Amino acid sequence: MNALSASDLRNRKPSRDEYPQLPKHPVAMVLDNLTSGFNVGAAFRLADALRLERLCLCGTTPVPPRPRIRHTSMGTERWVPYQHFVDGRTAVGTLTAEGFRPVAVELTDTATSIEDYSPAFPTALVFGDEMCGVASSTLGVCEDSVYIPMYGMGNSMSVVAAMAIAAHHFVAAYRRSANPAAIR
């Protein structure tokens, strides 16, 4: 077994000209008042890796171009589709009107374990700031909430870890349910 070189990896990927035409997985991520540009950059990199439909940057969430976003995004903010909204409630309302099912990734009194949740697509995953979580006005317009089970002593994880786990979980569920020929 040998690790693939950077050249090997590049040769397996579509070109930047081909990328916009590739079908996206029907998952959007809503970032509700995140405070760290590093976390936003990581969200761009994740959205690229999983070929998500788009990012919605809401409220005080930093928006490109910012050095911290560019640093952790590794340049993916140049091609990952994103929109800025005045707040999370507006973003969720827009996505709902487009047919997305908004799902908060948040510890709430009605949250379902992500392991037991059956997603419907398209889905908008809603994430809040690490300290305050998803704003109550945004939670109020989400149809469901899911949580990621914690097996250690802590009650939470970084928002970037939660985004990666939840987005991958939903993309994998979509890929299991979709026509494989439609997904490249």
Image (spheres, rainbow, N blue to C red):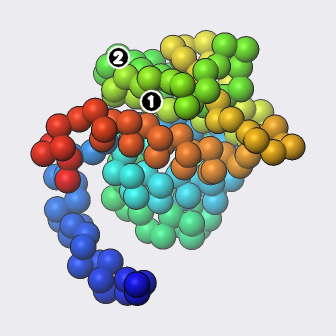
Rendering quarter of residue 34: top right
Left or right: residue 47 compared with residue 9: right
Which dot marks residue 124?
A: 1
- Determine whether 16 is above or below 145 in the image: below
Rendering quarter of residue 77: bottom left
Left or right: residue 122 compared with residue 93: left
Q: Which residue is mark 2?
A: 97
Mark 1 closeness class: few <14, some 14–19, many ≥20 residues within 10 Å = many
Q: Secondary structure at mark 2?
A: helix
Left or right: residue 112 compared with residue 78: right
Position of residue 55 measured from the top left corner of the image (x, y, whole percent): 44, 43
**Residue positioned 48% across, 70% down in the render:** 74
Left or right: residue 126 compared with residue 52: right
Question: On the rendered image, what quadrant is the N terminus found in?
Answer: bottom left
**Can you see residue 161?**
yes
Mark 2 and mark 1 in contact (Cβ < 8 Å)? Answer: no
Position of residue 134 measured from the top left corner of the image (x, y, whole percent): 67, 28
- Determine whether 128 is above or below 62 in the image: above
**Residue positioned 61% across, 12% down in the render:** 140
Position of residue 127 measured from the top left corner of the image (x, y, whole percent): 60, 35
Q: Secondary structure at mark 1?
A: strand
Q: Identify which amino acid the numbered label 1 is placed on.
A: Ala
Position of residue 108 measured from the top left corner of the image (x, y, whole percent): 71, 20
Q: Identify which amino acid the numbered label 2 is placed on.
A: Ala
Distance CA(mark 1)–CA(mark 2): 12 Å
Which dot marks residue 65?
A: none
